[in-house]
Amino acid sequence: MTLTRLLPAGVFLLVLHPLAGCALPAGAQAKPSPTAPVTALKGYPLADLRILDPQGGDHLDLVVELPNTNAAMSDGLMNVRHLSDGYGMLFDLGHSSRTAFWMKDTLIPLDIAFWDDLGQIVDIQQMKPCAADPCTQYRPSAFYTSALEVNLGLFERHGVRVGDQVKLTQR
């Protein structure tokens, strides 16, 4: 997935090429298990992420990779062929934005959830791979500070929806 260049160059050149989530290492378990030892697919830092409904019930626990430089965000998980359901990629912009994502060179379809600085999900979209320009731009319906990419359909299967809360714990 890729963010289009709508932010000032000095702030963030987020041309996030296929942020195609995180694949499991060979032999790792496929179900969400944020406490399991994991090796990051691209070597980015890892964190545990929990999505809760407004009444505090769990929807989903994930291990997420956190690209921590412009270059890492730009590379994302380009050319990843498999993303396990217990994993995702989180993009923390550090400021409020409506910058769009796109799927240039992304190999697998993805869900993306956008949330605000209070951790409340403000939009969820489904994104399709794109091999050649022009690619569809996926712009959230509201301002967001962070976005999470996971396998297509994962949010629906776990009842994740707009208004749910996101909690992130650094490893």
Image (tube, grey):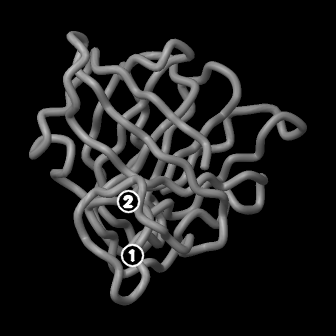
Query: Is 131 left or right of 110, judged from the image as shown?
Result: right
> In this rendering, is residue 4 above or below 94?
below
Q: Earlier in the sequence, mark 2 or mark 1?
A: 1
Across and down, in percent, residue 66 comes to 61, 52
Q: CA distance from mark 2 to mark 1?
A: 7 Å
Across and down, in percent, residue 58 comes to 22, 30
Residue type of the residue flagged with mark 1: Leu
Q: Identify the secondary structure beneath mark 2.
A: strand
Q: Identify the secondary structure beneath mark 1.
A: loop
Of residues 57 and 131, which is closer to you in this image? 57
Residue indicated by mark 2: 87
Q: Disc 2 vs disc 1: Cβ atoms closer than 8 Å?
A: yes
Q: Residue at x 70, y 28 (%)?
A: 94
Across and down, in percent, residue 25 comes to 43, 82
Q: Residue at x 57, y 46 (%)?
A: 3
Residue most toward the right? 10
Which dot marks residue 24?
1
> In this rendering, is residue 104 above or below 154?
below
Choose top left, top right, bottom left or bottom right for residue 57: top left
